[in-house]
Image (tube, coloured by chain):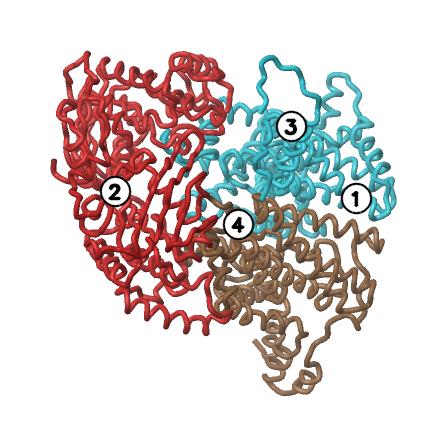
Amino acid sequence: MSAASHTLPRWADLLLLPVVCLAVALLAAAGVVALVGQNPVEVITVLVHGAFGTARGFSYTLYYATTFVFTGLAVAVAFHGGLFNIGGEGQAILGGLGTGLVALWWSAFLPAWIMLPLMVVAGALFGMAWASVPAYLQAYRGSHVVITTIMFNFIASTLLVYLLVNHLRPAGTMSVESVAFADSAKLPGVHEALAWIGVEWPASPLNLSLVLAGLAAVGVYLFLWRTRGGYHLRAVGSSPGAAEYAGIRPQRQIMVAMAISGALAGMVGMNEIAGVHGKLLLEFVSGAGFTGIAVALMGRNHPVGIVLASILFGALFQGGAEVAFEVRGFSRDMVVMLQGFIVLFSGAMAYVIAPMLAWALATLQRLLPQRKQPGAAHG
Amino acid sequence: MDEALLGSMLASTLRLATPLIFCALAGLFSERSGVVDIGLEGKMLFAAFAAGAAGAASGSTLLAMLAAIGIAVSLSWMHGLACVSHQGDQVVSGVAINIIASGLTVVLGIAWFAQGGQTPPVTAGVRIQPLFAQLTAGLAGVPWVGALLGEGLLGHNALVYLALALVPATWWLLFRTRFGLRLRAVGENPQMVDAAGVSVTRLRYTALTINGLLCGLAGSYLVLAQSASFSPNMTAGRGFMALAALIFGRWYPVGALWACLLFGFLDAAAIRLQGAHLPLVGEVPVQVIQALPYVLTVVLLAGFIGKAVAPQALGRPYTKER
Amino acid sequence: MAGPAVTAAPAVRMTGIHKQFGAVAANADVNLCVQVGTVHGLVGENGAGKSTLMSVLYGFYEADSGALEVFGQAATIRNADDAIALGIGMVHQHFMLVETLTALENVMLGAEPHWLLRQADVQVRSKLSALMQSTGLHVELDALVADLPVGDRQRLEILKTLYRGARVLILDEPTAVLTPQETEQLFDVLRVLRQQGTTIILITHKLKEVMRLCDHVTIMRAGRVVHEMPIAQASIEGLAEAMVGRKLHMGQVQEDTVTPGAVLLQASGIEARDALNVVRLHDLNLTLRSGEIVGVAGVSGNGQSELLDVLSGLLQPTRGHLELSGQVFEAGAWLDPQTARALGLAHVPEDRHARAMVMDFVAWESAVLGYDGFPQYASGGWMNHDHMRAATSTMMERFDVRPRDPELLSRSFSGGNQQKLVLARELGQAPKVLLVGQPTRGVDIGAIEFIYSQLRAMRDAGCAVLVVSSELDEILALSNRVVVMNQGRVTGELAIDACTEAKLGLLMVGEPA
């Protein structure tokens, strides 16, 4: 029997609970770190310094964060529509494929100011298309979107391998990647952009898709809370009966939610392919879809929270790389593990932690000295 | 197609299908009781690591298997704590288990064995050897029988036969015992089971325990019979393929078995068919065959090749209503 | 009919039962005495307290005070298992069956005599066969429940209770889902059971059935027992009056008798089915005129909800014709909620939580539900937050919704304030036709008069108002014209001055008045 009689006040639910869950996850991770003979404090110090201590490190943090903003927003939009989109991984792959294909075909003939927007559109459309099939199957044939998106993740990765190995790899080469794009298909790095206005900044993979991510976050916010479309989507996700009463059709909203979700995930290609690698390759998503789930859960499905959580995870990835470099025996898999703990405690275990937190708050209130309140009755 | 090829295909199919069968049966118990299990992949992975680590460290097959089973059962119980005892989201919990497993196994592997995440190979004494080696050798020369029966069917280790034997055993447990009846009921209508005086929580935890046991066997197989050591992310999506097989088999043990055999066959065929020309279609890219299990499952779920009806209460946390 | 004079202890005796839910006394000092081997009818409108009383007997609730005696022995019943152990069985309105299992397996579940199903099957089968023989209750034991028709499923539920040794059988509105033939079959079974000494308590509002089947009847109203008598001394008219009877506020003088004007809504030949394909509305006709309030009276569950859903476009009828604001709709090309709103039809749903508001939205977001596309709220897809907030503040002022905070979560308001906000939203659109379901459910006394005055004001402004309510007082206080529904049909239509307790009571139970 859970302590259901204690419910969390709204501020605690929105702010305190995620922080507590994060703390528990960090504690668990610290426990493992200590277990394997590392010093958690040392690890944390190196991590924080690696992520924020230098301009270069911070740039890397933001570069990772950019990808997570896209996948986190994707998961969040679907959640608002009442759906769990685990297919971010596959949708990001397809989006990157779209971005890359368009670049391969036309980058030699088009100037950057046409090429780059075209790549954005292609990435969005490909990601959208990949998400639309599971969406259609859920909305009109009742196939559970969780299972179908998991399947589509695998199909996407085999598709990418097939295309790269059999069609896009220049003949005679060993590495599984395409030829490099022409310069018009490359997003300038932030250090380059800053150089244009005379600011010195160390080189890093951080590129202008950071701006795109920011725009996406703002766009998602505006869409969800300022447009009728977003209102309809949230209504269906929250209360299908009330939405029906209002004349909103659930099936349509499922399609819309997943389409937008897929399009957002598809933007990962702009960061990785257009912004960094300049060619199509195999490993450019590498689990970002799943990190997006962690980001959305931590960020409570709100763009502001997602941006913050993305920076957090970006910091973990970048800081983790630094720790792997400096501390013997440490590997980046610790970050993966921490990510898993965060999903566990912020997601599934939140229901276990919430009643405990509520009980703790209630006990604290009782123990604190009574404040004089005029006319307050006590029962 | 000559007999040697057929024999070796048969053998490969069974070998590749075995971990799928264990996992699919594990998922069967969990999902039949109403608990979604996305975490098969993570549990199998962690169990494999445990088997590899314990096997290398202790030199005992038994300890290796117990470690694998112990870890998998613990993870299943954790899933139960979040989702059965409380109202946690079952999918999120499963995803968490997968991510934690993929990270934690490498962290511990590096810390304990310093081989980049791999565990040292277990010795031949720890590995599970083919059961009927002498019989197989004896049949080797016999045309057809030697290949098909000898290598194909009899050349396997105990875990393969165990997996196959567990299919009718699962069927019997599910359809011929009181426990099985109650399990099937709780996945369809937990209110009814509760009203009949049977504990929903106890049933689901029992199902999850069996689930952990079977995932532990799957993981053990990977390290003690297939390879000889654990390497990072060695499950490579097989847990999801087992889930797909379960759905493809419409949540029945025998159906799941056929699906696992089919997927195992496709896996075995994928490598062999590379570069080969099939009539009508020409050269089939290996990726098509790799993707086939997933595509087939989606087609099934879409209702194009018959209906797959999941247990009605699947995925919904149970709360006593009043 | 009535059995011989009984001297043995009653099967069930409940004394002084009191059960309070918050401020409402669902049962107040209730006494019930059921003799062994009789069929005892428990009759009353919705909210009369009969379901609560039986829930106490079956262990779902514990009474706040009072005593229970089963077969002469004092008893404490804390849960269903206690009740079953004492020989009490209950057949609920919503069956507790697993569709993918067979009938036999459903009976067996939880009481399997052996861990091996083969063995258990043999034992259970023989016991069930004997039971089926002796009672006349026949069910295909090896059929999957999914393949069984509703009547068979109910028989299966009864078998389940008998298998567990029930000697007192509680049936909750058993004929609600049955066809007339199935009802007959059920009655035959119940008569056989009675003959065998089983005691039956029948919760129902169908007085005809009570007269045909029961030996004794207890009538409840507003949580109390108002009458208790052997059937021999009862008549349908008497029962109807007792069930409904109260000092009706006929004195509500309609000072502002606006003569009803043009026909604003005309529905004819409406037939509607529910998700299980059971017909819920039979050949229903309804006319709504400008400047009148039409009240729909009747016990809940007789098609009133479906009527509201059909007229507002939420439920597609299988047959029927509708004329609204000059537009014509036929079954197959029916109205949808958005079109309805565009044509000036507003709907205050019965179900506040699942329909009327999105509980997780803040107040102003719920206050524009269904109207977010209207020009004052949005342009070109963008919602105008300022207008929406301002409109919500106005609504809150007008209807005294507290707290006056448009940013508060919808679920944080009390039920009464939620209702006021919904009413404010719908009435604020100045509709031509207004459909209202349970207008004052959960609303505090002070606000009820205000809501009534608002509804009257709508009427006076020329709106056609349809009010569905399970509170007869409310219907009588508001309506110019009362339409009574029973079993999906309109059984009668009376002008307000022609309404009497007796007539209404009879119409509500399907009798000609």
Give the number of the disc on residue A147. 4
Residue appearing at x 56%, y 67% in the figure:
B261
Is any part of residue B189 visible from this angle? no
User: Between marks 2 and 4, how big is the CA–CA gap?
Assistant: 59 Å
Residue that numbered label 2 is attached to? C228
The tag earlier along the polypeptide, 3 or 1, is 3
B155 vs A235: above or below: below
Colour in which chain B is drawn: brown
Task: List x then y, in percent, for residue A12.
Answer: 63, 28
Tag 1, which secondary structure? helix
Q: Amino acid at mark 4?
A: Ile
Between disc 3 and disc 4, the foreground one is 3
Give the number of the disc on residue A31. 1
Task: List x then y, in percent, for residue C133.
Answer: 28, 69
User: Between marks 3 and 1, how big is the CA–CA gap?
Assistant: 25 Å
Does label 1 lie on the same chain as label 4?
yes
Give the number of the disc on residue C123. none
Colour in which chain C is drawn: red
Residue appearing at x 51%, y 60% in the figure:
B183
Mark 4 Cα within 10 Å, few/some/many (few <14, many 20+)? many
Between disc 2 and disc 3, the foreground one is 2
Colour in which chain A is drawn: cyan
User: Between marks 2 and 3, how big is the CA–CA gap?
Assistant: 59 Å
C49 vs B290: above or below: above
Task: List x then y, in percent, for residue C305.
Answer: 29, 35
Q: Amino acid at mark 2?
A: Glu
What chain letter is assigned to the residue under label 2?
C
Give the number of the disc on residue A15. 3
